Amino acid sequence: MKIKEALRSACTPPEPRNKDKFIRSIRYPKLSYSEFILSQICYIRKRVWLFSAAVLLIVIGAVYMIPQNEKYLVWIISTLIPFLALMTAMEISRSDMFGMSEIEAGCRYSLPQLIGARMIILGVCNFAVISAIAVILGFFSPLGMMKAALYILTPYITVNGISLVVLDKVTGLECVYMNVAAALGVSLTGIFLLGGVLLDTRFVNTLCTMLCAGGVIVIMIQIRKIMNGRDECYGINH
C-alpha cells in the first residue's frame, strides 16, 4: 500500500496554472452554427439542386401543355414530388453509405448536427419549390392554392416520414432500396388516389389531411432523435 501511495503521489500532475487564460489564447478557426449550416450547401451534390429545378420546370411546362384539368395536372405532379423527399433522404444518409458516420460523429460539429444542417438546407429548398408549385396551380388549376398545397405536401411529407424511420432502422444499400421503394409506392398511390379512381374528392381530402398530420408527427419524432444525438440513430457508431 505504501508503494502504491508513493507512486500515486509521484505521478500526480501538478495543478495547471492560468489554464483558462491559456485556452483563450489558443487561435483556431471559429465558426458559428449559422455559418456551419451555410457551409454545408457546398457539400450537397449538384444533382439534388438540378432535380429540384427540373421538377419546377416540368410543372411550369405542364400547366401550359396539359389541358387545365385538375386530374391531369395533379397526376403529373404527384408522380414527381415523392422523389424530392427521396433525394433529401439520400443526402442525409450519405455518411453511413460511405462509412464516414463514426468519423463525423467525433468532429466538432458531430454527425447529428451535420444531418440537421443538411435537413434544414434541403427542407428550405424543397419548401420553396413546393410553395412555387402550389402558387402556380392556384393560378392555372381549378384546384385552388390551398387544395393544391395539400395534394402536393401529402406525398412529400409521407415519404419524408417513411424515409426517416427507415434511416433510423436500416443501414447500407438496404436503406437505399427501401427508400426508393417507399418513394415509388407513394408516387403510384398518389396517381390512384388523386386521379379519382373509385374514390370521391371528400374522402381523398380527408385522407390527405390525416396523412399530412401523421407524417409531421413522425418527422418531428425522428428529428428529435437526430438532435439528441442517439448513438444508435442514423448509422452512428453501428
Image: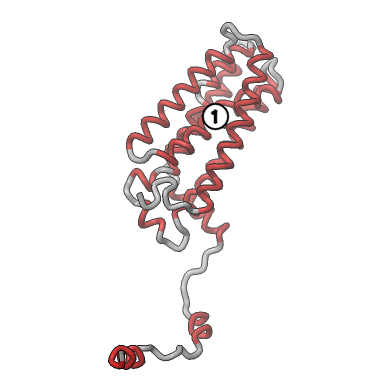
Rendered image quadrant of residue 202: top right
Residue located at (43% from left, 45% from top): 234
Of residues 120 and 63, the one nearer the viewer is: 120
Q: Position of residue 50 (x, y in %)?
A: 46, 35
Dot 1 surroundings within 10 Å: few (below 14), some, or many (20 or more)? many
Rendered image quadrant of residue 167: top left
Residue located at (34% from left, 90% from top): 5
Specify the quadrant that holds the N terminus: bottom left
Please identify the residue farthest to the front as the structure is shown. Answer: 1
Residue 166 in sight: yes
Rendered image quadrant of residue 141: top right
182 horizontally vs 72: left or right? left
Q: Position of residue 51 (x, y in %)?
A: 47, 32
Q: Position of residue 235 (x, y in %)?
A: 39, 47
Total count of labels: 1
- Above or below residue 63? Residue 6 is below
Residue located at (60% from left, 35% from top): 216
Q: Position of residue 30 (x, y in %)?
A: 51, 68
Of residues 229 and 147, the one nearer the viewer is: 229
Q: How is the image coloured?
A: secondary structure
24 horizontally vs 106: left or right? right
Reading the image, the residue beneath label 1 is 158
Q: Find numbered disc 1 in the image and state the secondary structure of the residue it sits on.
A: helix
Q: Amino acid at mark 1?
A: Thr
Please identify the residue farthest to the top as the structure is shown. Answer: 198
Residue 50 in sight: no
